[in-house]
Image: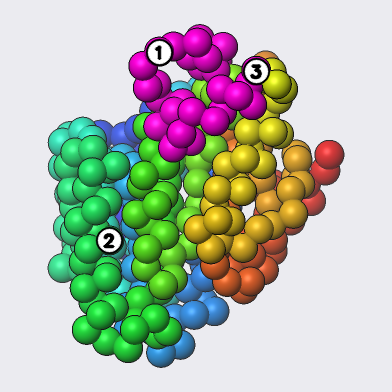
């Protein structure tokens, strides 16, 4: 296998990250594995992976120099690859490095790359999926889709979630920026203009919740998950520090950074996610 597809320094651009990224990528890797192993031989005409904040394809842990495969390469090198891929990033240099790393893959003709604002580009991606679904059997067994939504901060907007929810089958793994929201809510609470927090939640109701409950992350996460439920995503019982909402923490101060939220319209997706989140990257069962 080419060094482009292995967790080594290949001389190309890498995303510099903190050590917590290893845990996040481990959850993703194991979910992709169970997702594709269980469903690759079912009669879906396409199985599509979408990465709206793809990066260059590899991560460099700053403190240790460890190199990790990023989310796009994990999805491409899994035992049973998807049939089609959509990769998006704001930075042209990231897409250039990712293209180079994917160039030797037999799947390279099944990858589409986009440079720009993922909150806009997602419309084109979903249009292609819906066009494909309409040309085949509507709904069941047309396309099976998984979207990984992992921005650096508050770049993910609610309108993007609305767009992704339109296809019949679209599972979501969402970076919920708990730490970023904690920092921004007090700052933006009384702002007259729309802020990044308003775009993240898709409305200004969070301001009323902030007025009533203060900076209570549980209130806002439940509100966000309630909006997902209204789109047809099955509600998962909350599980604060463990299980369905794994929390990534700052390595030194152990301050909350972000959580991974999972959303699926089908109970089997939640069964997969529960299996994945029962243990952490070290193989240990997650404890309170």
* Residue occupied by mark 3: 211
State the residue in front, 182 or 34. 182
State the residue in front, 56 or 214. 214
What kind of element bears circle 1?
loop
Foreground disc of the pair 3, 2: 3
Residue 227 in the image: x percent, y percent? 55, 48
Q: Is residue 195 magenta?
A: yes
Quarter of the image with the C terminus in it: top right
Q: Residue at x 40, y 25 (%)?
A: 196
Q: Residue at x 24, y 53 (%)?
A: 123
State the residue in front, 270 or 203. 203
Find residue 250 and name its label.
none
* Residue occupied by mark 1: 192
Is residue 165 placed above or below 25 in the rendered structure? below
- Residue 1 horizontal side relative to residue 218, left or right: left
What kind of element bears circle 3?
helix
Q: Earlier in the sequence, mark 1 or mark 2?
A: 2
Coloration of the structure image:
rainbow
Is residue 284 placed above or below 212 in the rendered structure? below
Magenta range is 183-211
* Inter-mark Cα distance, 1 to 2: 33 Å
Residue 127 sits in quarter: bottom left
* Residue occupied by mark 2: 126
Q: Residue at x 21, y 73 (%)?
A: 131
In contact (CB < 8 Å): disc 3 and disc 2: no
């Amino acid at each position: 296998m080419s060094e482009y597809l292995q967790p080594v320094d290949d001389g190309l651009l890498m995303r510099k990250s903190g050590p917590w990224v290893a845990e996040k990528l481990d959850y993703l890797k194991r979910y992709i594995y169970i997702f594709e192993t269980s469903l690759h031989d079912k009669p879906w005409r396409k199985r599509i992976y979408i990465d709206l904040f793809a990066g260059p394809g590899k991560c460099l842990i700053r403190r240790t120099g460890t190199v990790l495969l990023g989310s796009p390469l994990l999805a491409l090198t899994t035992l049973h690859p998807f049939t089609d891929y959509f990769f998006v990033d704001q930075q042209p240099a990231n897409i250039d490095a990712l293209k180079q790393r994917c160039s030797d893959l037999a799947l390279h003709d099944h990858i589409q790359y986009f440079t720009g604002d993922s909150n806009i580009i997602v419309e084109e991606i979903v249009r292609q999926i819906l066009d494909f679904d309409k040309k085949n059997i509507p709904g069941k067994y047309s396309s099976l889709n998984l979207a990984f939504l992992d921005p650096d901060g508050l770049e993910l907007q609610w309108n993007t979630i609305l767009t992704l929810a339109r296809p019949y089958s679209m599972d979501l793994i969402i970076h919920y920026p708990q730490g970023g929201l904690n920092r921004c809510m007090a700052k933006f609470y009384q702002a007259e203009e729309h802020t990044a927090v308003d775009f993240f939640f898709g409305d200004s109701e969070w301001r009323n919740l902030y007025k009533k409950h203060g900076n209570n992350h549980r209130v806002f996460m439940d509100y966000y998950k309630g909006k997902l439920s209204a789109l047809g995503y099955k509600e998962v019982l909350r599980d604060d520090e463990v299980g369905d909402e794994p929390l990534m923490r700052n390595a030194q101060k152990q301050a909350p950074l972000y959580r991974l939220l999972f959303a699926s319209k089908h109970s089997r997706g939640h069964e997969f996610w529960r299996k994945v989140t029962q243990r952490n990257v070290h193989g240990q069962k997650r404890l309170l």
